[in-house]
Amino acid sequence: MELTVKDRVETGEMLPLMEEFYTIQGEGFHKGTAAYFIRVGGCDVGCHWCDVKESWNAHLHPPTETSLIVENAAKYSDTIVVTGGEPLMWNMDPLTSQLRAKGLKTHIETSGAYPLTGEWDWICLSPKKMKLPTDEVYAEANELKMIVYNKDDFRFAEEQAKRVGSHCVLYLQPEWSKRDKVIPMIVDYVMAHPKWKVSLQTHKYLNIP
């Protein structure tokens, strides 16, 4: 029996693709690196300061053949970043297996709120208070990126840092709309707690996607 579009989305053979683009990674450990971004629609974490709220409703983004997404990505870069929305709402196994079959490096940016699927070379975990990560993703995370909107976020960041492995790189990143207020706080905090590093959204300063 032929699978419906809904069935194929559920298996990961199709994904609600919001956008895909070739740019420079702007944040965290791999900032400055050329990378191809795949932005998948759908997110129910609900960050009030999210700068891609148009990604939240998966029904607004057309189900796209995963094989076609991979074919497009392979034309541009050997580093592929899967982001959202919240990409782990969907089964990432077909996407990453096809990307890796082409020798491409697979990176993901996730809140970790859903079960970890896919095979990843780099996992950037960015936990949110509204919907905490699964136990599994803490252990697998390569990078912990904590968004700082107010002073309480430093407390939350320390709670989350206790959950990740010793190999995980720790970042504090100012929420863009509050950057003028929180950057001095982050600088002082990192100087007092040097296990942390500062992450900035350099792509916004560079005016690129």
Image: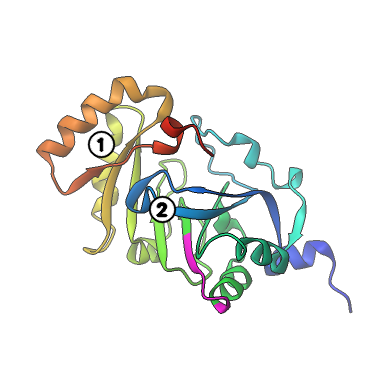
Q: Picture quarter containing residue 184?
A: top left
The percent position of residue 196, horizontal first and vertical second, equals: 20, 46
**Residue occupying the far left of the picture:** 192
Q: Residue at x 57, y 36 (%)?
A: 52
Q: Is residue 13 visible?
A: no
Q: Residue at the spot x=49%, y=66% of the render? A: 106
- At x 43%, y 59%, the residue is 134
Q: Is residue 27 above or below residue 94?
A: above
Q: Nearer the viewer, mark 2 or mark 1?
A: 2
Is residue 84 in view from this perspective? yes
Q: Quadrant of residue 192?
A: top left
Q: What residue would you read off at disc 1?
A: 154
Judge left or right: residue 38 versus residue 178: right
Measured from the top left, where is residue 117 in percent x and y? 53, 68
Kindly identify the amino acid type of the residue bearing the numbered disc 2.
Answer: Thr
Of helix, strand and loop, which one carries label 1? helix
Q: Amino acid at mark 1?
A: Phe
Q: Secondary structure at mark 2?
A: loop
Q: Position of residue 85 (x, y in %)?
A: 58, 46
* Quadrant of the drawing holding the N terminus: bottom right
Please give the label number shown on residue 179.
Answer: none
Residues rendered magenta in the picture: 101-107
